[in-house]
Image: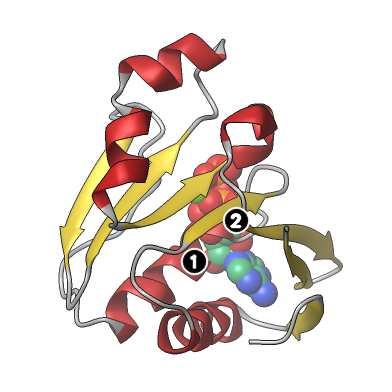
Amino acid sequence: MQTPGEAVCATPGETQALGARFAAALEEGAVLSLEGTLGAGKTQFVKGFAAALGHEGEVSSPTFTLVHEYAARVAMVHFDWYRLEEAADVIGLGWDDYLAGGETLLVEWGDKFPELLPPGVWRLRFEIEGEGRVVKWERTA
Ligand SMILES: Nc1ncnc2c1ncn2[C@@H]1O[C@H](COP(=O)(O)OP(=O)(O)OP(=O)(O)O)[C@@H](O)[C@H]1O
Ligand SMILES: [Mg+2]
C-alpha cells in the first residue's frame, strides 16, 4: 500500500473494497485511525477489511459498546472513540494492552486523541464528495 495515497470510492462496495485492499497489504498488528464525519464510510471500510480476513459476522460502529473484537484470520479489534471525552477513557479501556498485544487495531474517530496513536499508524481521512467518498491516507513516521 503506497503512502501517502488517495482513492475515490463511488459506492459503499468500493469503500469496502478499499478496506479489503488494506487488509491484504498490511501486516498483523497494524493500527489504522479512521477519520471523517458521521456517515463518511469508516464502518463500510472496516466491513470490507474484516470480510477480507474471513470474518463472517456483522460489523457495526462500536459507538456505544466502544470495542468490538473479531476473530478473523488475524485478531482484529474495532474501536469507536466518538463518544469518549478524554484520553483517560481510552486508556481505561485497556488501550496500552491492545497496543502491546499485537492485534490489528482499527479506530473510528482516532483523530479525537491523536496523542494516543502509536508511531507507524495509518491515518485515513474519509470525505463525502457528492454521492461518493474520497479517502486520503498516509502512514505516519
Ligand atoms: N461511496 C460510499 N462509501 C461508503 N459509504 C457510502 C458511500 N455512498 C453512500 N454511503 C452510505 O454512507 C453510509 C456510511 O456509513 P458508515 O457507517 O460507514 O459511516 P461512518 O463513517 O462509520 O459513520 P459514524 O461516524 O457514524 O460511525 C452508509 O449508509 C453507506 O451506505
Ligand atoms: Mg462508523
Residue behind mark 2: 121
Q: Position of residue 34 (x, y in %)?
A: 60, 53
- Residue 21 drawn above or below residue 97: below
Q: Is residue 66 visible?
A: no
The amino acid at mark 1 is Gln
Tell me the SS state at disc 2: loop
Q: Position of residue 90 (x, y in %)?
A: 43, 22
Tell me the SS state at disc 1: helix
Q: Position of residue 137 (x, y in %)?
A: 75, 68
Using the rendered view, name the quadrant where residue 65 is placed: top left
Ligand 1 is found in the corner quadrant, namely: bottom right
Q: Position of residue 128 (x, y in %)?
A: 80, 61
- Some atom of ligand 1 lies within 8 Å of the CB belonging to the residue at label 2: no
> How far is the residue under mark 2 from the one under mark 1?
20 Å
Residue behind mark 1: 44
* Closer to the eye: label 2 or 1: 2
